[in-house]
Image: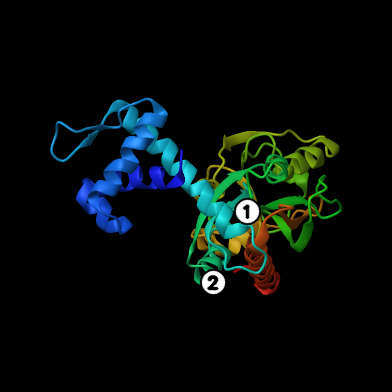
Amino acid sequence: MKISEIRAFLAVAEAGSMHAAAARLNLTQPAVSRLIQRLEAELGAVLFDRTSKPPTLTPAGHQALAHGRRVVQALDDLSGSVAEGADPRGSFRLGVSLGLSQLVLNEPLDSLRRQFPGLVFQVSSAWSGDLLKDVESNAQNAAVVLSSDRSEPATTLPLSRVGSDRLMVVTAATSPLPPRAALGDLAGQGWVLHPEGCSYRSALKRALAQDASPFVVAVEAFDQELQLSLVARGNGLGLVPSCLLRHSAYRDRLRAIEVPELDYRLAVWIARGRFIGSLATVVDALETATRHMLAASDHAELA
């Protein structure tokens, strides 16, 4: 089958009539009809019920519509991303670590949208290790991932370190806990954390184990902003990178606690796919925007 046949089918399905599709494609109505008939012959299925006016999709047509859109999107992605130096078009698939999704989807993504208005940004969140696998398999074009400040992500992908951040213990602004406390002083306090798989949850567990203090989870949630809202309402202690705290809508309702035994810094990296063509310029811009954002958080003071 030919891409022109698929595009004609999509045009009719989306425009609602042969006449409107012909105008969209700059073809005659008979030409569009012939393209649809050829596609139906090649698929061995009737895609439109022509007894209705205008024609409506058959059950096979509805299935073909979803698949056809994916085919055309993939071809648009291919043509818009393979040529080095070309203006990027199509989709840019970005993975963001769960610990940073709230942050990267603000200023850095706004900056990319301004610079590349012709791109469709498809963003998903997962643990850093899973995102690196996605980039390796070309399911993602790039990923923003986290590691300990003392280590580097385990991958052979091209990596750029764009900054680091400090992990902070936070409590509700109205909490009676002191501004500086030993880890043992927090024994028995519940924690609002990511589920298992989070690197700084693991760092907290190690620190508590070394201190022989209990590890008590009050709430598990993937969304960092939801976690901070729960902490602000007095549901437990939280762990958050300082840059996320600075951007949180709940910042004024939270207070940091200095905990000397929990001195953990995160490194932020951007991994890029090996064969991304013109999308390399998008990753370059992402690195610049993320580096700027993290540098700004280093100089911001917590109220």
Image height check: is 78 above or below 49? Answer: below
The front one of 181 and 270 is: 270
In front of the other: 199 or 81? 81
Label at residue 292: none
Residue 149 lies in quadrant: bottom right
Mark 1, Cα crowd under 10 Å, few <14 / some 14-19 / many 20+, is many
> Disc 1 and disc 2: Cα gap in Å?
22 Å
Q: Is residue 92 visible?
A: no
Q: Give left or right: position of 209 versus 140.
A: right
Q: For residue 243, say whether it is visible.
A: yes
Residue 128 x %, y %: 70, 45
Q: Nearer the viewer, mark 1 or mark 2?
A: 2
Q: Is residue 253 shown left or right of residue 303? A: left
Residue at which label 2 appears = 115
**Mark 1 touching mark 2, by CB under 8 A?**
no
- Who is closer to the viewer here, 119 or 204? 119
Q: Quadrant of residue 165?
A: bottom right
Residue 293's quadrant in the figure? bottom right
Tell me the SS state at disc 2: helix
Upstream in sequence: badge 1 or badge 2: 1
- List x then y, in percent, for residue 258: 73, 57
**How is the rendered protein coloured?**
rainbow
SS at mark 1 in the image: loop
Name the residue: 29% across, 48% down: 31
Mark 1 lies on residue: 100
Residue 186 x %, y %: 70, 44
Given the image, on which type of amino acid does mark 2 rest? Gln
Comparing 226 with 110, the one in front is 110
Q: Which quarter of the rendered picture does the C terminus lie within?
A: bottom right
Relative to residue 209, is residue 175 drawn left or right? left
Residue at 51% across, 53% down: 76
